[in-house]
Structures are given as C-alpha cells and as structure tokens.
Amino acid sequence: MRRAVPFFLCFFLVACMPTITRREYDQKCKESVNLHNTLTGQVYYQGSKDGYDYFLFEPFGAISHHARLKEGDVALKKRIPYSGDRSKWVVAYPDWSGVTNMVIQTDATNR
C-alpha cells in the first residue's frame, strides 16, 4: 500500500495540471524570468507525454506552478519523455525574439 501512495500522488498531480495557452505560457515566463531584476527564476521543461509539453514555472521568491501546453505550441530544441525526476528537466528559456529595447553586446568585456 505504501508503494501505491507515491504513484497515485504523482498521477493526481499530472491529471490535475492546468492546460494553458501559448499566450498564458509567455506571461508565466515573463513573471518567472524577469530580465530587469538581478535575481531571476526559472522555467523548466519536464518533458512531453500524451500530446502535451509539461513545464514548471519557478519565479524567485514566489510559489512555483506546474502547467502543460499542447505539444508543439512552444518551440523546443529537443523533446524528451515526461519525467518526475528533476535532474532530467531542461531549463526552458522563453523566446525573447519579439522583445524590443534589448541590447546584446558581442565581444564585450567586463571591465
């Protein structure tokens, strides 16, 4: 019976995970990874399962949130099978290509 409890807990968490849209994903990324602060949070890609991509939004100093999107709504370099093992998750940086007023310096030094 004790072995069944973690399985059912994991199943319950995945089954009750909210499905969000691409727009909601972008908003959660902005809230989690704030470029204007020196302390930032992370967005983790947990893998894909049953036609969905699973993510953990972990803003600095706030409660983390799990969510899923339909597979393919977010461009990922590589899709992996869903895993509850945090060591297998991939940091998923949001797509900042549409951001204006962002300066990227190449060949710059920190002097």
Image (tube, helix red, strand yellow):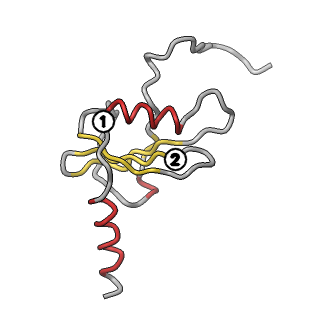
Give the residue at mark 2: 58
Image-quadrant location for residue 72: top left
Whichever of labels 1 and 2 marks the residue nearer the N terminus, that label is 1
* Position of residue 90 in the picture relative to residue 61 (left or right): left
Give the residue at mark 1: 21
Image height check: is 104 above or below 89? above
Image height check: is 4 above or below 86? below
Image-quadrant location for residue 23: top left
Q: Quadrant of the N terminus?
A: bottom left
Residue 21 coordinates in the image, percent (x, y): 30, 35
Which residue: 19% across, 45% down?
51
Q: Quadrant of the C terminus?
A: top right
SS of the residue at dot 1?
A: loop
* Position of residue 32 in the picture relative to residue 73 (left or right): right
Residue nearest the viewer, comparing 78 with 36 = 36
Q: Which mark is residue 104?
A: none
Residue 76 coordinates in the image, percent (x, y): 33, 34
Three-letter residue code for mark 1: Thr
Q: Residues within 10 Å of mark 2 (few under 14, many from 20)?
A: many
Which residue: 66% across, 32% down?
37
Query: Separation of disc 1 and disc 2 at Cα?
Result: 18 Å
